[in-house]
Image (cartoon, rainbow, N blue to C red):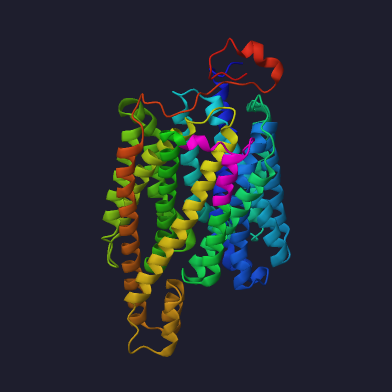
Amino acid sequence: MKNSGSRKWWALAPLVLAVLVVGLDGTILSVALPTLAGALHATTSDLQWFVAAYTLIFAAAMVPAGMLGDRYGRKKLLLAGLVIFGSGSLACALAGSAGAFIAARALLGLGGAIIFPMTIGVLPVLFSEEERPKAVAITMAVTVAGYPIGPILGGWMLTRFHWSWVFLINVPVVVIALIAVAFLLPETRALERPRFDPVGILASSAGLAVFTYGVIEAGQKGWGASAAVVEMVAGALVLAGFVLWERRTRDPLFDLTLFRSRAFTWGTVLATLVSFAMFGLLFAVPQYFQAVRGTTAQGAGFGLLAMVGGLLVGALAADRLAKRIGAKFTVTLGFALIAAGLFLGSSTKVTSGLALTLAWTAVVGLGLGFSLPSSMDAALGALSTEGSGVGSGMIQALRMVGGSLGAAILGSVLNSAYTSHLGLTGLPPAAQAARQSVEAGVAAARQLQSSQLLDSVRTAFVHGMDVTLLVCGGLAVIGVVLAVVFLPRRGESGAAVRAPYPAEPSDVVERAKEPAHEVV
């Protein structure tokens, strides 16, 4: 069957399932942490490592995983990633101690790090230039949709079943994805297998892991914490060494000349900027729903559905819009909508109704739907099919770092504005607990039965959220400027030449007669 038929769209289904299960896992964990703390007798440090173990392995392994996919076959690696992710989910469910759970989370991170670049890396191979934007839009929309669905599903399950089912739910989805990948996805890999670059693999993995850990530490302990600063500087130095090595070695892990392509460079930068702003929003808004509007984590997930609805509408329309006005202006419009929605959200007061929140998050979602898939597609369009795995791994790794920075930096902005706006004068000493976090403030107010403290905590948090949304809006304005100035217009060359290649060398002669986007 030729790739021009319907098979490639059926092949997209297992890819969507794969990214959905990874997207769900991260936010489901956030809902389950309080339950896990009691069930596994976990300390605060343990809880931090429940998150960090996954994030660090995820960030460190994506680029090497992409290279392995190019070398041995992306389908094989995707199947391996799903098996690892399913095994990690099962290990999480069966964990009897905090240490065992941390090890299982690291295994989940490895599976996710393989799944994401393989999923994105096959899109330039399966789909033509005209079809790829739609495929990217569908994949990105499902990825982002997993963030609010996680708390909804996790909250519902935790109220009805044992906590282990929060992770066991991944297993049947992984099994379905495995069967679908095995039967529907064609195998693709580079004709000339890339050679191993052990120094590049070690440097990129270590640099990304150490830098990301420093960012996590800074978000938890403050940006002045010496350990966090040392870790970020060390990670940055290792990554600088990685760049220098890649420029000199004969067989680099990643082709740095890709950054000469405006489409790849600025598509990646803009996709990372979207992730930066989006994770700041996802950090603030769920807390607003729970601390100010009094919902559960499950209710906060429902509150984000307006954003998901806007994103789905935007993502489905982005392909058609890009064909009419070009990706450059589609991305620009997306960032403009994100900025408008965030600026509207920054007018939120404690007394604001739900309609305002739903309106501005829907506008932001619409902007995300326009900007994220279109900027990702611009970057992917610059990849040759020979290196689409490692290239997509680099894009996803940079987006991961951008998201971690967004959560840490914007979280610090929110916490700083929150604590500076707290009014605790005349309240009992126990009210000082409110300085730790808005959750601690609400708990202290209820324990003290103090409406004054509760009002102060909620007012201070809304102020902090408004400041955070203003900063995110400013970043979105920068995104508008970058898209206008740097993204290539329609018809301008910014992509590498994409040569088709088969799963097996014996197919070369037969494939030479087929269109460039066809895969058997």
Q: Is residue 417 left or right of residue 297?
A: left
Where residue 302 sits in the image (x, y, percent)? 43, 54
Picture quarter containing residue 286? bottom left
Is residue 253 magenta-colored? yes
Left or right: 456 as drawn, with respect to 400: left
Q: Residue 152 at what x, y percent from top left?
A: 50, 54
The secondary structure that dominates the magenta segment is helix
Which residue: 53% across, 14% down? 515
Query: Residue 186: within the magenta?
Result: no
Q: Magenta residues? A: 240-259
Question: Is residue 416 in view?
Answer: yes
Q: Position of residue 99 (x, y in %)?
A: 71, 65
Q: Quadrant of residue 345?
A: bottom left
Query: Residue at coordinates 62% horizontally, 18% vertically from top-left?
Result: 520
Q: Residue at x 66, y 49 (%)?
A: 202
* Depicted 144 relative to depicted 373: above or below: below
In the image, 54 versus 172, the foreground residue is 54
Above or below for 489 versus 474 = above
